[in-house]
Image (cartoon, rainbow, N blue to C red):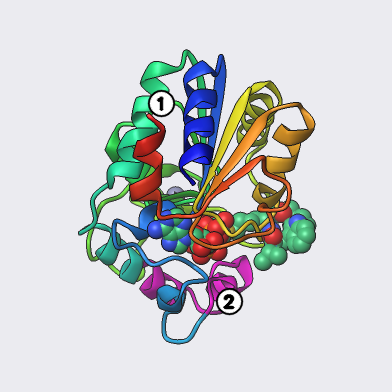
C-alpha cells in the first residue's frame, strides 16, 4: 500500500491535467448511506425502484417522501476530509475537473467549483409543466410541492434511471476524461452507466488511473493502482 500510495501521490503532483470521478462512497464517511451498502434501502425499496419517471408517474407522493427522507438526512451531514482534499486538487492543478454521481451537494459545500453533477442535485427542483429549475432547501419539503410560477407539479432535478444525462455534462466529462493525465476513481461501485464506462475512456486515452475503495469493483481490473481503503483516510494522503 505504501509504495502504491507514493506512486499515486507522485502522479497526482506531476499531473498537468487531473480528473476525479466520485460515487456514494466518498460521502459514506460523512454519514450519507450508499446505494448498495447495507443502509442503502428505504422501506425496502432499491433506488432503481424509486428513481424512475415511471415510479413518479405512478406515485409522486411516494417518490417525494423518499427524496424528503434523503434531504432531511443529508441536511445534517458535512463534507469530510476526502471532499476537502478534492477541493485542494482543484486549487493546485490548473487543468482540473470533478465528475460526481452524487446528488448530495457535499462537493459544492466543500468548495468544489470545477465539477459536473451528472445525476443532478437533491437541492434543486424542476417544474414538470414549465420546466423552470430552482434551488429549494425546504426541509421538510411540502408533499406535494408545486411550481410558484405555473402551479405545475415539481419533481427533483435529478437524472433518473432510463433518463439521459445532459448533453453538456456528457461533452464536458468526455473532454476531461480524454485529456487528463491522471484520473482518480473514488468510492463508486462502477455499475451504473454511462458513468461506469468513464474510467475506461480515460485509460484508453493514455491516463494513469487509480481507484480508492475499500472493496474490489469492476474497475479494479482496469486501473493502474487500487488503493484499498476509506476515502477520508486515503484521499488526503494523496496531497
Ligand atoms: C441512460 C440519481 C440513456 C438518482 C442515479 C448499459 C448497460 C446496462 C445498463 C444500462 C446501460 N446504459 C444505460 C443503462 C441503464 C441504467 C443503468 O446503468 N442501470 C444499471 C443499474 C445497470 N443507466 C441509466 O438509466 C442512465 N441513463 O443511460 O440514459 C439510456 C436510457 C435507457 C436505456 C439506455 C440508455 C441514468 C443513470 C443515472 C441514474 N441516477 N442517481 C438518485 O440519486 O436519486 S444513479 C445512482 O446510482 C448514483 O448516482 C450512482 O450513479 C449509482 C450508485 O453507484 P455508486 O455511487 O457507486 O454507489 P454504490 O452504493 O453502488 O457503491 C458505493 C461504493 O463505494 C462501493 O464500491 C463501496 O465499496 C464504496 N465505499 C463504501 N464506503 C466507502 C467506499 N469508498 C470509499 N470510502 C468509503 N468510506
Ligand atoms: Zn412551472
Mark 1 and mark 2 residues within 8 Å of each other at the beta carbon: no
In this rendering, is residue 117 above or below 50? above
Front one among 21 and 10: 10
Task: Please tell me whether mark 1 sits on a helix, a strand or a loop.
Answer: helix
Residue placed furthest toward the front: 3
Q: Which label is found at residue 220?
A: none
> Residue 107: x, y in percent?
36, 40
Front one among 210 and 56: 210
Q: Does residue 24 appear in this view?
A: no
Which residue position is annotated with label 1?
89
In the figure, is residue 169 to the left or right of 100? right
Question: What span is colored magenta in the figure?
Answer: 46-67
Q: Quadrant of residue 179?
A: top right
In the figure, is residue 23 to the left or right of 53? left
Question: Residue placed at 44% from the left, 43% from the top?
Answer: 133
Which residue position is annotated with label 2?
49
**Magenta run includes residue 58:** yes
**Magenta run includes residue 48:** yes
In this rendering, is residue 69 above or below 137? below
> Residue 13: x, y in percent?
47, 20
Q: CA distance from mark 1 to mark 2?
A: 36 Å
Amino acid at each position: 500500500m505504501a509504495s502504491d500510495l507514493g506512486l499515486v501521490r507522485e502522479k497526482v503532483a506531476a499531473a498537468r491535467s487531473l480528473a476525479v470521478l466520485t460515487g456514494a462512497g466518498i460521502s459514506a464517511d460523512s454519514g450519507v448511506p450508499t446505494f448498495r451498502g447495507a443502509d442503502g434501502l428505504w422501506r425496502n425499496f432499491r433506488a432503481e425502484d424509486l428513481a424512475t419517471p415511471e415510479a413518479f408517474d405512478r406515485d409522486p407522493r411516494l417518490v417525494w417522501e423518499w427524496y424528503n427522507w434523503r434531504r432531511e438526512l443529508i441536511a445534517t451531514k458535512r463534507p469530510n476530509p476526502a471532499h476537502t482534499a478534492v477541493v485542494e486538487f482543484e486549487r493546485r492543478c490548473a487543468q482540473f475537473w470533478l465528475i460526481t454521481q452524487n446528488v448530495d451537494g457535499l462537493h459544492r459545500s466543500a468548495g468544489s467549483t470545477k465539477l459536473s453533477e451528472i445525476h443532478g442535485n437533491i437541492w434543486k427542483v424542476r417544474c414538470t409543466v414549465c420546466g423552470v429549475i430552482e434551488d429549494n432547501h425546504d426541509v421538510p419539503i411540502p408533499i406535494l410541492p408545486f411550481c410558484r410560477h405555473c402551479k405545475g407539479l415539481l419533481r427533483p432535478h435529478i437524472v433518473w434511471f432510463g433518463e439521459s444525462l445532459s448533453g453538456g455534462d456528457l461533452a464536458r466529462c468526455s473532454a476531461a476524461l480524454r485529456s487528463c493525465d491522471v484520473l482518480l476513481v473514488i468510492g463508486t461501485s462502477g455499475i451504473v452507466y454511462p458513468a461506469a464506462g468513464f474510467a475506461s475512456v480515460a485509460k484508453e486515452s493514455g491516463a494513469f488511473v487509480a481507484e480508492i475503495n475499500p472493496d474490489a469493483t469492476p474497475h479494479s481490473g482496469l486501473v493502474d493502482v487500487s488503493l484499498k481503503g476509506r476515502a477520508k483516510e486515503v484521499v488526503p494522503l494523496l496531497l
